[in-house]
Amino acid sequence: MSKKIIIANWKMNPASSQEAMSLFSGISKNVSQIKKTIVVICPPFIYLPSFSKALAGKGKIKKQISLGAQDAFWGDTGAYTGEVSAVMLSDIGVKYVILGHSERRVLGESNENINKKLKSAISANILPILCVGELERDENHEYFNFVKNQLLECLNGIPKNLLYKIIIAYEPVWAISTTQNRRDATPLDSREMAIFIRKIISDKLGVGMKMPRIIYGGSVNNKDAGEFLRYGGIDGLLVGKASLDVKKFTDIIKIAENENN
Ligand code: 13P
């Protein structure tokens, strides 16, 4: 069984570098005993260089925490005002990048763009966390086709032997903490979609190929993380709001560590 991976998506938080560093150090200190769980922190771009320096200065912590970005543009350099490339992120020690988050898709990010970003991230040696997920669940189960289409368009043309590098995050938009009139998703909802995603990928890959990891995100907290990890058919969690709270987030990491045992 692969190691559980717990990823913090801080989104556009917190407001100051001082608060960001205090959150980061709080989490770092609390995970010094974690051995089997992979922990990734994805802060806003602007905090990445100082976190990277902090990690370089503390040999012990380095093994437990990796850094991720919340987006990365395609290409290496060029006339793309306001963008940051995967190559630039890799240069400062960033190992992961979230791509295709629903909060970016709603601003106009297309599957086609995400596909280009995935290819660039992989060639820059950054592991992409590809977010997919339906806006709503309909009685006719159209949401399966919706997720399938997102997956196939985003993964189009990526060589089979590289697909395992991508972490697929199933995030049903209706369960995300900031969605209006949100509802709780259950570990069963996660399990059902994780099986569906595995089937799509294994049809694409054929037998004998290394599979990507599948994780779940959508209002996960320290109360339900264990259930999702145990029954959700997944290899880890993508945590938003609860990752901004040192205690809640480190509780989630410790729960994952126990599940790894
Ligand atoms: P919440 O955990 O705040 O619902 O956010 C989920 C998410 O969007 C993580 O990427």
Image (cartoon, helix red, strand yellow):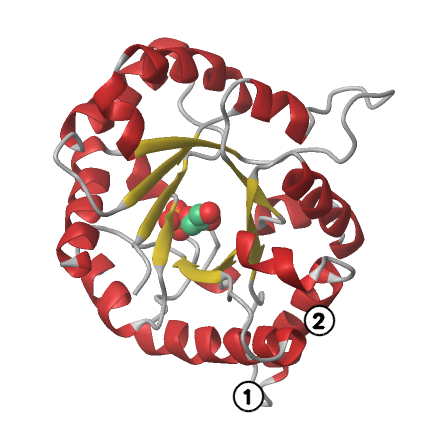
Image height check: is 103 above or below 47?
A: below
Q: Is residue 84 left or right of residue 256?
A: right
Name which quarter of the figure residue 214 lies in.
bottom left
Say which residue appears at 25% left-offset and 51% top-offset.
Answer: 221
User: Mark 1 or 2, which is nearer the eye?
Assistant: 2
For the residue pair 79 and 174, the one nearer the viewer reads as 79
Give the total number of marks visible in the rendering: 2
Q: In this view, does 61 lie to the left or right of 92?
A: left
Q: Name the residue under label 1.
A: 139
| Label 2 CA crowd tier, 10 Å (few <14, some 14–19, many 20+) | some
Q: What residue type is labelled 1?
A: Glu
Q: Name the residue under label 2.
A: 149
Q: Which amino acid does label 2 sit on?
A: Asn
Say which residue appears at 67% left-offset and 64% top-offset.
Answer: 160
Sequence-first disc among 1 and 2: 1
Marker disc for residue 182: none
Query: Would you say the beta carbon of the disc 2 residue lies within 8 angstroms of ligand 1?
Result: no
For the residue pair 157 and 72, the one nearer the viewer reads as 157
Q: Is residue 50 left or right of residue 220?
A: right
Image height check: is 104 above or below 226?
A: above
Furthest-bottom residue in this view: 140
